[in-house]
Amino acid sequence: MRTEEYHEKRQESLDRVYEFLVFNDEESFEQSQVEQLTRQDFVYMKSKKTLGKMFNATRILLNEFFQPYNENLAFLLNDNRYLWR
């Protein structure tokens, strides 16, 4: 799951995760704990925007380093959105 998707459609994303993990009724308490954590601990902070743009050299370095992993992930998931192009 991409972070962007999670922030745009949090409940739908969590439902897909729960379905993948095959939660049952006995685990609903744990499921609600996860939902509570996401509300409290993963709040999008506007202050991130004040950091400025990433240095081009840093972007190139990161892209080169992660490219083979992203390609493998995109292939395994059959989803080119993980290629970051």
Image (cartoon, rainbow, N blue to C red):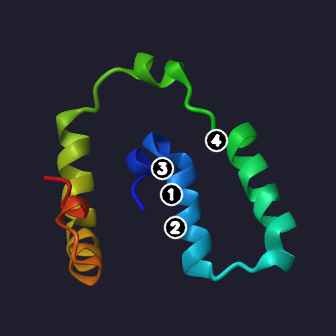
Q: Give the foreground label among 4 and 1.
A: 1
Q: Report the amino acid beneath label 1.
A: Ser
Residue 46 left/right relative to 1 = right
Secondary structure state at the residue bearing disc 2:
helix
The residue sitting at 72% across, 52% down in the picture is 35
Could you give the CA–CA distance between mark 4 and mark 3, rounded to whole angstroms? 11 Å
Q: Report the amino acid beneath label 4.
A: Phe
Q: Position of residue 20 (x, y in %)?
A: 54, 79
Residue 13 circle label? 1
The residue sitting at 51% across, 20% down in the picture is 46
Q: Quadrant of residue 44?
A: top right
Secondary structure state at the residue bearing disc 1:
helix
Total numbered labels placed on residues in the image: 4
**Residue under numbered circle 2:** 16
Q: Position of residue 33 (x, y in %)?
A: 82, 57
**Residue under numbered circle 4:** 42
Secondary structure state at the residue bearing disc 3:
helix
Neighbours of disc 4 within 10 Å: few (<14), some (14-19), many (20+): few
Q: Report the amino acid beneath label 2.
A: Arg
**Residue under numbered circle 3:** 6
Kindly check if marks 1 and 2 are in contact, taking CB atoms under 8 A apart as contact: yes
The residue sitting at 52% across, 19% down in the picture is 47
Could you give the CA–CA distance between mark 1 and mark 2, rounded to whole angstroms? 5 Å
Q: Name the foreground residue: 18 vs 85.
A: 18
Kindly check if marks 4 and 3 are in contact, taking CB atoms under 8 A apart as contact: no
The residue sitting at 27% across, 64% down in the picture is 66
Q: Give the foreground label among 3 and 2.
A: 2
Q: Name the foreground residue: 13 vs 25.
A: 25
Kindly check if marks 1 and 3 are in contact, taking CB atoms under 8 A apart as contact: yes
